[in-house]
Image (cartoon, rainbow, N blue to C red):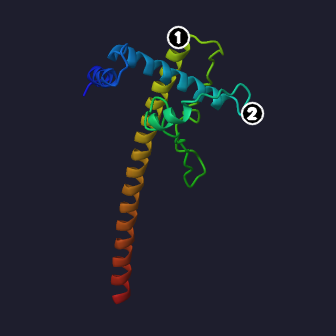
């Protein structure tokens, strides 16, 4: 079911219960405004660890339940990249500074339509970085599995050689 159909059905249901001035478009817009309010409060609470400027909103807990699986509001956790040292003590990474740095938010405290756009852009870039990290971790996992396979084969050959050598 697409959003328009959903909001229209909800509006129809509300009209049947006596809410006369309700239509799907206004419900959709109201929900979007409330979701943006939730995002602003959530982002503000992350910035102010002391609790200063914290806003109480009676719908906050309700929206937190609704948006729990929304990746635009709750991005996946960061997985840091780790440089693995080889036996000589040198780094396997070509470049030591390829760990992505999370940009700090430069949003002002005044409501601004551009700040929401910046936050959305930041979230999209963050998601792209996380997907790249995941691919990198998968590649490392495959390399480790291949290395383990080669080492097992070496051990098997060594055992065969020692067994033959001990029998002679």
* Mark 2 closeness class: few <14, some 14–19, many ≥20 residues within 10 Å: few
Question: Which quarter of the image is occupied by the N terminus?
Answer: top left
Q: Secondary structure at mark 2?
A: loop
Is residue 17 among the parts visible in the rendering? yes
Q: Secondary structure at mark 1?
A: helix
Residue 147: x, y in percent?
A: 40, 57
Left or right, residue 87 beside residue 150: right
| Above/below status of 67 relative to 125 | below
| Above/below status of 168 relative to 127 | below
Q: Which mark is residue 67?
A: none
Query: Tag 1 or tag 2, which sits nearer the N-term?
Result: 2
Q: Nearer the viewer, residue 54 or 22?
A: 22
Identify the residue at image location x=30%, y=25%: 13
Q: List the residue tagged with mark 2.
A: 50
Q: Nearer the viewer, residue 168 or 98?
A: 98
* Mark 1 closeness class: few <14, some 14–19, many ≥20 residues within 10 Å: few
Left or right, residue 51 beside residue 11: right
Q: List the residue tagged with mark 1.
A: 113
| Above/below status of 66 relative to 18 | below
């Amino acid at each position: 079911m697409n959003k328009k159909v959903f909001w229209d059905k909800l509006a129809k249901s509300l009209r049947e219960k006596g809410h006369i001035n309700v239509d799907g478009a206004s419900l959709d817009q109201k929900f979007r405004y409330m979701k943006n309010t939730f995002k602003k409060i959530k982002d503000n609470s992350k910035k102010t660890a002391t609790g200063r400027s914290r806003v109480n909103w009676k719908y906050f807990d309700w929206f937190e339940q609704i948006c729990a699986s929304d990746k635009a509001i709750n991005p996946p956790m960061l997985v840091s990249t780790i440089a693995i040292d080889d036996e000589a003590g040198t780094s396997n990474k070509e470049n030591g500074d390829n760990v992505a740095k999370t940009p700090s938010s430069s949003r002002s405290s005044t409501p601004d339509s551009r700040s929401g756009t910046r936050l959305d852009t930041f979230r999209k870039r963050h998601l792209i970085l996380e997907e790249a990290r995941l691919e990198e971790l998968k590649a490392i996992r495959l390399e480790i599995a291949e290395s383990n396979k080669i080492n097992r084969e070496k051990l098997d050959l060594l055992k065969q050689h020692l067994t033959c050598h001990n029998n002679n």
